[in-house]
Image (cartoon, coloured by chain):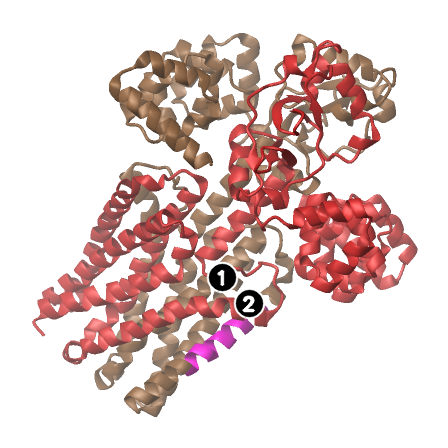
Chain colours: A brown, B red
Amino acid sequence: MLVERNRILTETIKRLMRRGSEARLAKIISKVHAADLPSVFSSLSYSNQRRLFYLIRDPEKRAIVISELDEDISLNIIEDLSLADLAEIIKNMPSDDSVAFIRMLPQQKAEAVLGMMEKTESEEVEGLLRYDDDTAGSIMNPDFIALKENMTAGEVIASLQSQEYMDVEMPFYIYVINEDGCLVGVSSLRQLVVVPPSTPLREFMAREVISVTTDIDQEEVAKIVARYDFLAVPVVDQDAKMVGIVTVDDIIDVIREEATEDILKMAGVGEEFVETKSIVRSTRIRLPWLFASFLGGILAIFIIAHFEESLKQVSYLALFIPVIMGMGGNIGIQSSTIVVRGIATGRINIRHLWTVVSKELAIGMILGVFYGLILGSLVRFHYSLNALAISVAIGVMSSMTVAALVGSFMPMIFARMHIDPAVATGPFVTSSIDILSVLIYFQVATILLGI
Amino acid sequence: MLVERNRILTETIKRLMRRGSEARLAKIISKVHAADLPSVFSSLSYSNQRRLFYLIRDPEKRAIVISELDEDISLNIIEDLSLADLAEIIKNMPSDDSVAFIRMLPQQKAEAVLGMMEKTESEEVEGLLRYDDDTAGSIMNPDFIALKENMTAGEVIASLQSQEYMDVEMPFYIYVINEDGCLVGVSSLRQLVVVPPSTPLREFMAREVISVTTDIDQEEVAKIVARYDFLAVPVVDQDAKMVGIVTVDDIIDVIREEATEDILKMAGVGEEFVETKSIVRSTRIRLPWLFASFLGGILAIFIIAHFEESLKQVSYLALFIPVIMGMGGNIGIQSSTIVVRGIATGRINIRHLWTVVSKELAIGMILGVFYGLILGSLVRFHYSLNALAISVAIGVMSSMTVAALVGSFMPMIFARMHIDPAVATGPFVTSSIDILSVLIYFQVATILLGI
């Protein structure tokens, strides 16, 4: 449905751009929901991206569109914009988006734009820029509704109509603070309308408020919001003073980002963005990850070279290198993926190291015996060499067993050492498995074949 | 923070269980937030899980806890519960959770429980059970606020205090329906309190409402909620009649689930749950996926056997099988992961097949030339055999180039054929790459070495 909608909109806009019907384009753009525009940009050339953005006249729409665009597209458009345009766009963004946006700008431009903004606004943004990337502070919104506990429901409702709270993004929770600005309770719009208007907040607010501090990792914030089904979670500073809220829409972005990051890390494409268009940049990111696999390969060369005499005598031995490596590699990926994802979602507890590893080990052994016996029988049947058949069978079994062990043990150990387990998967696990598989196989074969 | 909180709670409960202090346990459990309990269960033995659940006396808390538990734990507890207990729990669940819960029960038990429930309730649940798994219908909540357009803001607020709407989960949107129950507009609690009480809904409601139909895939619903930053999206049936809402907290679960599913599928652990404790079940799920890799390995045996004469003459050839397969395999996983995740997040457009594939191809070639030259030089230096060095270099280059091509092309083609691209990765891609790498390497070597 969304896909179809995107397609139609994209095609209409492209057709009108080809025809140069700027007036009709501007009309369509003014009608369409701002959230529908970003997907159109990725189908356009760089020059048409700038042209389309220029046609968005409403500054608020511009702000929504540009904060949703992929980074390379935003950077392309930003180059084309004047400082005044940039300042106008930032002014119309929720503060949390404007922080992410300013972080993307080149240093000089960022400072110039901040200089052009009104003092209260630039101070607010600069305040947020202090927080480290990926913390609650960096994704929070400093506009929220915080009132004193002696206010009545009726007074609260009246104050919601004031200019001060017009900018608040998701005004569903009413936070209650004391004289020092510390969070003491929370209520909701829902409760406000169901209690008699004269009831003071203190009488119906909830006193147990779950909050996060500004330095907490955004992934942790996401877990809290997901666990308690919150629409927003309040953020407090070191002095327990309330300084912002993180809303559920930002949490959705965090959850998607983190899942993508985990997947990419596991494949050894570390910090590559899916949308990266630069071949040079992608190459540079992937190169070092492949180095682990390259080193593993070099090590395998030495291992096999060590058994060269055996290979000369029984050249059959080489035939089974791919199947033994492949079976080990694949079950290794299965085990490590289950464990890495289990840790990320909290389903696997890193304190249960042995339970997890021994389960994977058992699976590896069962599957190893299964495929080892099949392959051994095929070899026995085809080559009529018992010792070769047994070597190959043991090769598959041990390779799969070791792979399941390494694939589950490494991420668990990394997690315990507070190193991201997703990084431990991919090239590292596969290279270790490759080396171990080849080593065990040749060792067993030389012994059994008596060479 | 959350981890620390879990740890303390879990340890306290375990200690009290060892001591048998049921009274103190019951007290702690009554105080703790229901959402904090599920993580405790996964650290307990099956018998203690039943014992702990029995200590939760509040039926609403029981409902929250059991719908958040991992499936194997829920099933363990369910076995211990009477039909009356089950009916009581289901009664206290939001309808969307109760549907998921009843789907988990054995057929007979499910029917017996539905028979015990009040007619209106069981009818509601049975109505939802009609929808296919993973559709908007199956995750929607049939309790929502829908009013007529001539009602005034004041009347709406008054009606929110009525018993009818007490059960509504997230009453932030006020939907407006016509005589036939068709959705014609939407307003929000926020707007209700800022307009004068005498204003009728028709004057301030938004007329353009984005809704989904009951049969739409939950992933699609998640994309809509994420794109427009909704807190809930209305669900309509074929006749445009409003039948439910999907709330953002359920969308968060969908996004996490889908990310996990994608990751597991890519690794060829298909429908395995991270929390599956049964070794037999995990083994059964992984076995067929490994078969693809096994067949690939068998094919590789025949390919290498075809070049057996060359191997006998130049036994060195075997040394480089692992590094060539490994480099191909790893870059293949990188390319396919980038593409699969790009498609899943909508960052890669499947209509841009050639743009995507040619980018990956270029990266594969650059990295292939890089690592091919390094390995070739090392071989030239160490063995002083030019032809072998060139064969190995070409082997690495072609293997990496082909891997990037296959790794990006296969998921794109699968996506175009409306087959889940995540499935195309993992064993299928790696096996194809293994076979092609070995084939090209030996072919090039026999030609260059003149054997």
Residue B67 located left or right of residue B421: right
Position of A73 relative to A269 (above/below):
above
Q: Are marks 2 and 1 in contact (CB under 8 Å)?
A: yes
Residues at marks 2 and 1, CA–CA distance in whole angstroms: 8 Å
What x and y, as percent, mark residue A333?
45, 61
The C terminus of chain A lies in which quarter of the figure?
Answer: bottom left
User: Is residue A231 something one can see in this rendering?
Assistant: yes
Residue A157 located left or right of residue B357: right
What x and y, as percent, mark residue B168?
74, 34
Residue identified by numbered label 2: B282
Write down the quadrant of residue B310 in the picture. Answer: bottom left
Taking the magenta stretch, the answer to whether it contains residue A212 is no
The earlier-in-sequence mark between 2 and 1 is: 1
Residue appearing at x 42%, y 25% in the figure: A37
Write down the quadrant of residue A19 in the picture. Answer: top left
Residue A418 located left or right of residue A438: right
Q: Amino acid at mark 1?
A: Val
Report the span colored magenta: A358-373
User: Is residue A291 something one can see in this rendering?
Assistant: no
Q: Nearer the viewer, residue A15 or A346?
A: A15
Residue identified by numbered label 1: B269
Q: Nearer the viewer, residue A432 or B131?
A: B131
Q: Amino acid at mark 2?
A: Ser
